[in-house]
Amino acid sequence: MRAFLSRAGAGAFLIVFALNLAAGNSPAHGLVKGLVAALAFAFLTRWFMRKAYTQVPMAALERQVKAHQAKHAPEHAAHAPAAHEPPAAAAA
């Protein structure tokens, strides 16, 4: 993931630095804005990738749980008492 963040930061730096030079700003001004953009984009990419890496396994786990519940729901329904039946203690 470190290489991915480095590439994302370098890409943001190059884009912002090139746009500043194309706009006629001084190279020092473009350098500062490029470094700030690289840092901000690296943080944004890190946040997004952490969210993506945690959400994908959670979604897969939720699908597995739902599939397991759907597969075993008839078994559990056969063993569970019906809602209209009184409890065994109250019937005695």
Image: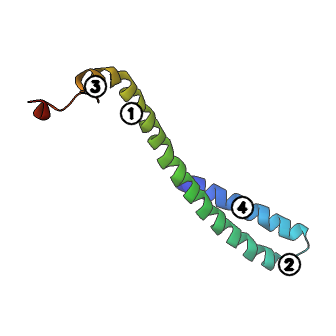
Judging from the image, what secondary structure is the residue with disc 1 in? helix
Judging from the image, what secondary structure is the residue with disc 4 in? helix
Label 3 vs label 2, nearer the camera: 3
**Tag 1: amino acid:** Val
- Between the C-alphas of marks 2 and 4, the distance is 18 Å
Label 3 vs label 4, nearer the camera: 3
Label 2 vs label 4, nearer the camera: 4
Ranked by sequence position, the earlier of labels 3 and 4 is: 4
Q: Which residue was labeled with disc 1?
A: 65
Ranked by sequence position, the earlier of labels 4 and 1 is: 4
Q: Residue at x 38, y 33 (%)?
A: 65
Q: Which residue was labeled with disc 4?
A: 12
**Tag 3: amino acid:** His
> Closest to the observer: 22 or 53?
53
Ranked by sequence position, the earlier of labels 3 and 2 is: 2
Looking at the rendered structure, which numbered label has been put on residue 26?
2
Image-based side of 84 in relation to 56, left or right: left
